[in-house]
Image (cartoon, grey):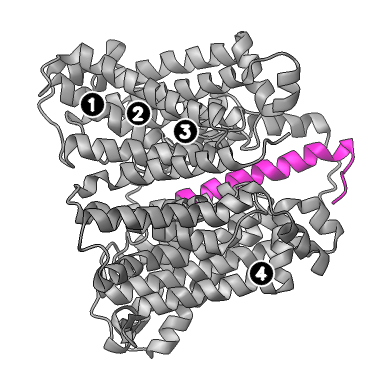
Amino acid sequence: MSQTRSSHLATFDRRAFFQRFGLVFSFLLLMIVLSALSERFLTPSNLMNVLRQATINGIVSVGMTIVILTGGIDLSVGSVLALSVTVGASLMKQGQPVAWAVGVALGTGTLLGVVNGLMITRAKIPPFIATLGMLTVARGLTLLYTQGQPITGLPAEFRWIGTGVVAGIPMPVILSLAVFALGWIFLTRTKYGAQIYLLGDNPTAARLAGVPTDRMTVLVYAISGFCAALAGLVLVARLDSAQPIIGQGYEFNAIAAVVVGGTSFSGGEGGLAGTLLGALLIETLNNGLNLLNVSPLWEQVVKGVVIALALLLYKVFSPPSK
Amino acid sequence: MLNGNHSSSFISFLRRTSTYLILLVILVWFALLSPEFLTVGNLLTIALQTSLVALVAIGMTLTIITGGIDLSVGSVAALSGALAAGLATRGGLGTYPGLLIGLLTGLGMGFLNGAMIVWGRIPPFVATLASMAIARGLTLVYTQGRPIAGLDKTFTFWGGQGALGIPVPVWVLIVVAFLAYFLLKHTPLGLHIYAVGGGEETTRLAGVNVGLVKFSVYLISGLCAALSGLILTARLWSAQPNIGVGLELDAIAAAVLGGTSLAGGVGGIPGTLAGAFIIGVLSNGLNLLEMPSYNQQVVKGMVFILAVMLDYFIKQRQAKPKGNPAD
């Protein structure tokens, strides 16, 4: 497996260069511009704010990156997030131990991810369609289970996940950095990571090289489900409220971070470092607009323009294909 | 894994008609369960409710046949509705210039999508994801997040009752569906749309201007989305900034239920209409049976997955006699 990993690391083309440094430059440029425009931007509390805002989308994006690397997509993350936290929150309301409830919530997310993976590998439903079905079903189950009512008043020890501070750093930030670090190690330092890149690059070659493609596919969707559930727990712990419509549209935010981060939609190209920067870039922009007193109504426009610009730049800097 | 000895003509019959059979089964099922279901009034209600998704799904089908997708339709519908309503009322332009600008907005967004995909070589999924955010954002900025009311009768006419007791949106759907069907089946452009989805490089080598074909499908999709947005605005008697959220997913579901393959090259308007009506009939029937809306979403999601799986199994059976590629 070691030779397959070196194959994607060895191709150090202009695209990879731009992906690595172009994004960093854009990010730094944005930071400089915002610091010049607003003296409040470059303060520790504001920067921590940006980090905290980016955590939820960041955690979801880790799973999304891994799925997109295989050439797939997971549209169900927002609904899976909602169903998982609803199950977890209601267990806590019944007085079950917090650790058990958290475990069940994470298990629910993972299980739903496994179902996605099985629909894709066993029933041969395209990922887009399979996860679109899951999006509908999981959201419906959430609404059914909660009867449309939010679940609030969660135990303090659980809320610590979202509101706690360790060594001056908020828990959500610590958790999401940990998820990024684990994901990065998984992708770049284990044989499974190499197999995921190979699978996304060329499924047939991967199968011939002995990659258990079906099992890897189920695994990546399970990881995505797990990440969605974890992000949901952090969010609910912070808000102290599990709304049944929580997480709606999160799939698009995560895809935006992944895409701005330079992971290719056709699979096999990209990684978590880019996604981390992508998520931070989008959040920094939102924060900057906020500080500059631009109406939050502009947020979506800016997000769309940034996605389009990032993609155009990747195309400009990539070597001509074919 | 499926070793049926069924005659392949029966299987291919099933393959061609599975969407309609599903629709028929659902229709019969609801007719048996609810006496109110099979009345003219209720069927017209279904047609009216389905027309909004169906219009968008027609444009979506064209983009999917070329191997693309258009995620921006819901936002484009909202932006067109908002601009048309705003310019017709507080802009003082009147209804028809307002509606015209609404339609031009759809074309403009379609042009933006086409430009990003053809000239920028951005994958359709992310290009239209970007324009989805842009159009929704512009809608929020233009409306300031508030509805725009005060439409006059010439505007709301487009959402109301039309000739022969059939609602105007249904008439619009009939016209658009017919035009799209004609375009796909009886014009060179239609042939090229299928060809691009079947194999882009081959089509290019055959001398077809692939970029132009792609541009046209996104322009048409934008126009269909705008029509849907204008009609919904007329029906609601106001432009709501958050209409059309999730509309892209319904439209994709309708196209896929109708047998259009996301891989491109396969699909058609009659199937998409049947797909849209499966969704519409399900909502209506489950409502009549007084199923809570929460359960409905679960049922709809499961029907969607089952229909796609059924389609896959039928396809497998049909493909079997021709020899099985390496598994």
- Which numbered mark, 1 or 2, is in the foreground of this view? 1
Check disc 3 and report the residue beneath it.
B276
Label 1: which secondary element: helix
Q: CA distance from mark 3 to mark 2?
A: 20 Å
- Which numbered mark, 3 or 2, is in the foreground of this view? 3
Q: Is label 3 on the same chain as label 1?
A: yes
Chain at numbered mark 1: B
Residue A218 or residue B47, whichever sits in front: A218
Label 4: which secondary element: helix
Q: Which mark is residue B315?
A: none
Amino acid type assigned to the residue bearing label 4 in the image = Thr
Check disc 4 and report the residue beneath it.
A188
* Residue farthest toward the top in the current orientation of the protein: B187
In the rendered image, is residue B2 in sight?
A: yes
Check disc 1 and report the residue beneath it.
B83
Q: Name the spot of residue B93 as percent of width and height, x first.
A: 14, 14
Check disc 2 and report the residue beneath it.
B39
Mark 1 crowdedness (10 Å alpha carbons): few <14, some 14-19, many ≥20 = many
Q: Is residue A243 above or below residue B96?
A: below
Residue A280 or residue B68, whichever sits in front: A280
Q: CA distance from mark 4 to mark 1?
A: 49 Å
Q: CA distance from mark 1 to mark 2?
A: 37 Å
Q: CA distance from mark 2 to mark 4?
A: 62 Å
Choose top left, top right, bottom left or bottom right for residue B43. top left
**N-terminal label among 3 and 1:** 1
- Which numbered mark, 2 or 4, is in the foreground of this view? 4
B320 is within the stretch colored magenta: yes
Q: Is label 4 on the same chain as label 3?
A: no
Q: Is label 3 on the same chain as label 2?
A: yes
Q: Residue at x 51, y 16 (%)?
A: B180
Q: Which residues are magenta?
A: B300-327
Q: Is residue A290 above or below residue A169?
A: above
